[in-house]
Amino acid sequence: MSDQPNNPLHGVKLADIVEYLVAHYGWEELGELIPIRCFQSNPSVKSSLKFLRATPWAREKVESLYLMTERRSKRSENSPKFKPPKNS
């Protein structure tokens, strides 16, 4: 049985989180949402991972943004799609 049943980040790698956020927002917007140098100046996944692993407060911000983005994404997927009425 899992040690962390209520942890939504359990089993998710930090590299996957950073790559997801970069794909979703891009480096520029990510650097605006979380203003840290590794996202703003010559960004790369490798340099970001090195910084985030050594800086707990920054990692928490990245993980929080990931969870918020995932929730919004799932909510929009599950919301009913608008269907225009049929003209008979």
Image (spheres, rainbow, N blue to C red):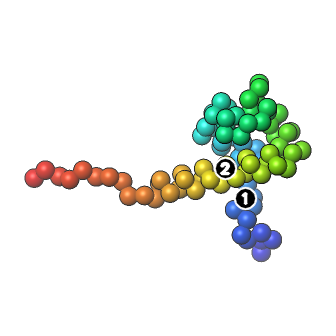
Image quarter hosting the N terminus: bottom right
- Residue 28 at what x, y percent from top left? 65, 30
- Rendered residue at 73%/51% (across/down): 63
Residue 67 visible to an observer of this rendering: yes
Q: Kindly identify which residue carries mark 2.
A: 66
Above or below, 29 against 60 in this view is above
- Residue 19 at what x, y percent from top left? 69, 40
Task: Find numbered disc 2 in the image and state the secondary structure of the residue it sits on.
Answer: helix
Q: Nearer the viewer, residue 11 or 79?
A: 79
Q: Is residue 51 left or right of residue 80?
A: right
- Residue 35 at what x, y percent from top left? 73, 36
Above or below, 2 against 39 in this view is below
The residue sitting at the bottom extreme is 1
Label annotation for residue 79: none
Task: Find numbered disc 1 in the image and state the secondary structure of the residue it sits on.
Answer: loop
Q: Kindly identify which residue carries mark 1.
A: 9
Q: Nearer the viewer, residue 30 or 18?
A: 30
Q: Amino acid at mark 1?
A: Leu
Work out how far the residue at label 1 is from the one at label 2, CA to CA, in angstroms.
9 Å
